[in-house]
């Protein structure tokens, strides 16, 4: 049986840098990773949603995962992305294992939908190609029923569940079912866009972990929010939600794909020339970029203000 994945901290989904010619830039990726590891994420998820797995070839994704494993060097778990058509998903899973990843995050199958039995078969087919454990991603056309998750929980290779649907009652039922199968080692986490807005509710149903895209562009603020969340500092948590996260969501919702595009733009604003997003995503307009820049400045001010108050106590 694979060893349980131990996550302690914000789950970090790095962007994938592209150079002026549009090629993956592994040097910039290393810089991006190193600068964020200083803030002690609970795990690193390269070549996943924020990392534009959908827009990369399997060989590109493999290089990204391999470089991440090299930079992280065992400090925290590295979970590579896999998904799409079943043959591609198997290729990505094998590549992640060969690159030294600790697990895979299994994204939805490409375009098509099938019944619950077909989704279950998809997971089992992909896992037949690798010995890596897998976290299944519940979203879009990969919606796992309670019965499917109860069945998958009997497979020791399935070690986690990431919820990107937002049906709290359904997620609660899945948590209970998995635990009833004796799998108290399961890693449950909230994978909704800007998960900070909903994490208080998810903690209440037994899903204590969450992924943070903000960590990729402003790790100091993402870490401050995580501290407020874990220490039950409700005044600080609510202020961060009100002054930063809620305005970020309003900007994100203006354009499809901005859950990724804004994060990459934020990394560029931070001084790292990581390039544009690949199609079909689009970069923010100059006006949207200016608003993002102002919002990031607000976030930095919140971090500085909290540090000053903490130093004076």
Image: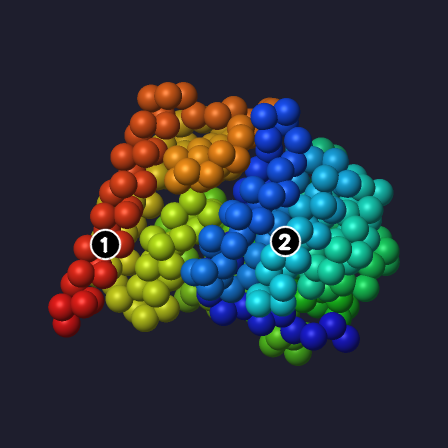
Helix, strand or loop status at disc 2: helix
Drawn side of residue 11 relative to residue 101, left or right? left
Precedes in sequence: disc 2 or disc 1: 2
Q: Quadrant of the N terminus?
A: bottom right
Q: Residues within 10 Å of mark 1 (few under 14, many from 20)?
A: some
The residue that disc 1 covers is 304
User: Which disc is residue 256 wearing?
Assistant: none
Where does residue 134 sit, x and y in percent of width and height?
A: 70, 60
The residue that disc 2 covers is 68
Where does residue 37 sit, x and y in percent of width and height?
A: 49, 59
| Distance between the alpha carbons at the discs numbered 2 and 1 | 30 Å
Does the rendering let one see residue 65?
yes
Where does residue 288 sit, x and y in percent of width and height?
A: 36, 25
Q: Residues within 10 Å of mark 2 (few under 14, many from 20)?
A: many
Q: Quadrant of the C terminus?
A: bottom left
At 72% from the left and 45% from the top, the residue drawn is 63
At 70% from the left and 59% from the top, the residue drawn is 101
**Of residues 38 and 172, the one drawn nearer to the viewer in this rendering:** 38
Does the rendering let one see residue 195?
no
Drawn side of residue 295 relative to residue 103, left or right? left
**Of residues 235 and 93, the one drawn nearer to the viewer in this rendering:** 93
Where does residue 31 sit, x and y in percent of width and height?
A: 53, 48
Q: Residue furthest left?
A: 312
Vertical order, 127 against 249 (above or below)? below
Helix, strand or loop status at disc 1: helix
Drawn side of residue 33 relative to residue 56, left or right? left
Vertical order, 116 against 312 (above or below)? above
**Of residues 272 and 3, the one drawn nearer to the viewer in this rendering:** 272
Q: How is the image coloured?
A: rainbow
At 77% from the left and 47% from the top, the residue drawn is 92
Residue 269 appears in which quarter of the rendering?
A: top left
């Amino acid at each position: 049986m694979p060893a349980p994945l131990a996550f302690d901290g914000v789950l970090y989904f790095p962007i994938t840098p592209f150079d002026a010619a549009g090629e993956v830039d592994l040097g910039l990726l290393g810089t991006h990773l190193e600068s964020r590891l200083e803030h002690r994420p609970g795990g690193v998820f390269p070549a996943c949603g924020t990392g534009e797995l959908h827009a990369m070839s399997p060989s590109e994704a493999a290089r990204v995962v391999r470089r991440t494993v090299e930079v992280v060097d065992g400090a925290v778990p590295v979970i590579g992305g896999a998904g799409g058509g079943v043959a591609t998903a198997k290729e990505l899973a094998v590549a992640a294992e060969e690159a030294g990843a600790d697990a895979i995050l299994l994204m939805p199958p490409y375009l098509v939908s099938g019944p619950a039995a077909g989704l279950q078969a998809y997971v089992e087919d992909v896992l037949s190609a690798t010995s890596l454990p897998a976290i299944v991603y519940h979203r879009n056309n990969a919606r796992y029923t309670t019965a499917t998750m109860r069945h998958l929980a009997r497979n020791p290779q399935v070690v986690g569940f990431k919820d990107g649907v937002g049906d709290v009652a359904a997620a609660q039922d899945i948590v209970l079912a998995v635990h009833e199968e004796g799998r108290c080692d399961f890693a449950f986490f909230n994978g909704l866009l800007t998960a900070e807005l909903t994490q208080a509710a998810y903690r209440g149903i037994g899903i204590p972990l969450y992924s943070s895209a903000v960590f990729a562009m402003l790790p100091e603020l993402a870490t401050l929010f995580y501290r407020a969340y874990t220490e039950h500092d409700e005044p600080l948590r609510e202020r961060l939600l009100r002054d930063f996260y809620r305005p970020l969501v309003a900007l994100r919702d203006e354009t499809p794909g901005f859950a990724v595009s804004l994060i990459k733009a934020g990394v560029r604003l931070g001084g790292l020339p990581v390039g544009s997003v690949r199609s079909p995503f689009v970069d923010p307009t100059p006006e949207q970029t200016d608003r993002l820049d102002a919002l990031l400045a607000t976030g930095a001010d919140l971090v500085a203000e909290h540090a000053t108050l903490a130093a004076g106590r």
